[in-house]
Image (cartoon, grey):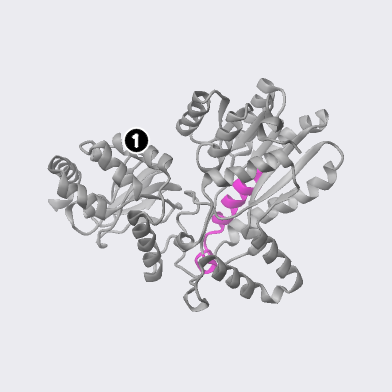
Amino acid sequence: MARTLQNAIRGRTVMVTGASSGIGKEVALKVGAADGTVLLVARRRELLEEAKAEIEARGGVAHLYVCDLADPDDIDAVAAKVLDQHGHIDVLVNNAGRSIRREIASSYDRFHDFQRTMQLNYFGPVKLILDLLPSMRERGSGQIINVSTGGVQMSGPMFSAYLASKAALDAFSRSLGFELSGEGVHITTVHMPLVRTAMAAPTRMWDNFPALSPDEAADLICDAIRKRPVRVATPLSNFAQTAYAVAPGLDHSVNALIGRLLLRQPFRKLKLRPAAAGDRPAEGDLALREAFRRRLESGAVAADPVEVERLANRLRHIPLFEACSPAELKKLASTAYPIAFEEGEELCSEGDESADCYVVVEGEAALTIRREPVGVVRAGEVVGERGPIEGSPRAATVTATSRVHAYAISQDRLEEILSDNPDAATHMRRLVRARYAPDSQR
């Protein structure tokens, strides 16, 4: 066991998947600061370039590799390129993943959800390991860290696709560990607890649960690099796993007890069945969402200053917000939260009461009015802005045609800016009216 992270990785090469944001980016920053050479792997080049620049600005060394980790051919190409350029990998951190929350009754005709989740969360890491492991065994040195979830130990409703994919990776890791015993190649599984990331944001229930920041989650992975344990897990997750092994019939009761301990709420108030992702939120789900918003706005939940600055910079380059001051942009960003929509899910429904608008950062969605296609919404554009700005019902239905990552912008904060900044109000209303002029003439 190395005494410090720097001792563990100085002069060594560490590959981190999902390094464009969240936990993966934080791990990469810490490895770069500890004198390791970081290989950043993810799909989004723009964000990888930002991470690389940040690492280099701090004196670190980083290389980026754009790769769709759900595509085996893409993985083969990147692995071959990495081995050609660097010779070997000392540490592989399989962090990239996707989560999906949907009750089974809403999944009968969505088998593709299970296939896509398994492709990225299980087959992707396995393919990368198969490509990089031979050089590790040949050298008699290396470490593979597979980021799993404490949910595999604790279980829970509506996450059958996600938990099954992570359970498969856990079983693979345990079996592989036996085969590599004594060869100098270490396998570590990190059963990650809840972390405040874009992946967790769509599940409103988690808003009331304690969670790690991405920085704290990255510390768990960096400790795993330093100590090389077989497994990293929280005491509560270990307790749940042990309880299930001893008394599986009590699984639901044990997990409800853990939820009560985390929430510090009595059983009767413990809501474990919010609306499935993709459905219109149930009343209780909306209440949780608004409660989290109020906590952000009141300062009861601290906004991540790095994320606020990053989102404010994004807003600055979107035409709708061009007339806002830097302070106003930060005000909007400080109460925004990330949200993900799966392909086929509606971001907005025509005629619905207006609420938050969404700034799309990745993916595409189709815009329809009276069921007639009228356009496409892409990254860098805003969805549902007419309602919050003009106080009118939703003007169109917007349906995701791919997985969409967006930020929900508070209607209340928008209204404050419209009230306090006449120039911004005029600018926003002019753009909105120009965009929806054809609709108003019908």
Vertical comparison of 314 with 413: above or below: above
Is 282 included in the stretch rendered in magenta?
no
Is 120 included in the stretch rendered in magenta?
yes
Quadrant of residue 17 in the image?
top right
Disc 1 marks a residue whose amino acid type is Asn
Residues in magenta, as a range: 103-125
Q: Residue furthest top?
A: 85
- Front-most of residues 192 and 139: 192
* Percent of width and height locating residue 211: 52, 55
Q: If the image is split into quadrants, where does the N terminus sit?
A: top right
Residue indicated by mark 1: 313
- For the stretch drawn in magenta, the main secondary structure is helix
Q: Residue furthest right?
A: 182
Who's the residue at 51% across and 67% down the image? 263
Who's the residue at 75% across and 68% down the image? 245
Residue 39 visible, this orientation: no
Vertical comparison of 280 with 134: above or below: below
Vertical comparison of 139 with 229: above or below: above
* Percent of width and height locating residue 23: 55, 43
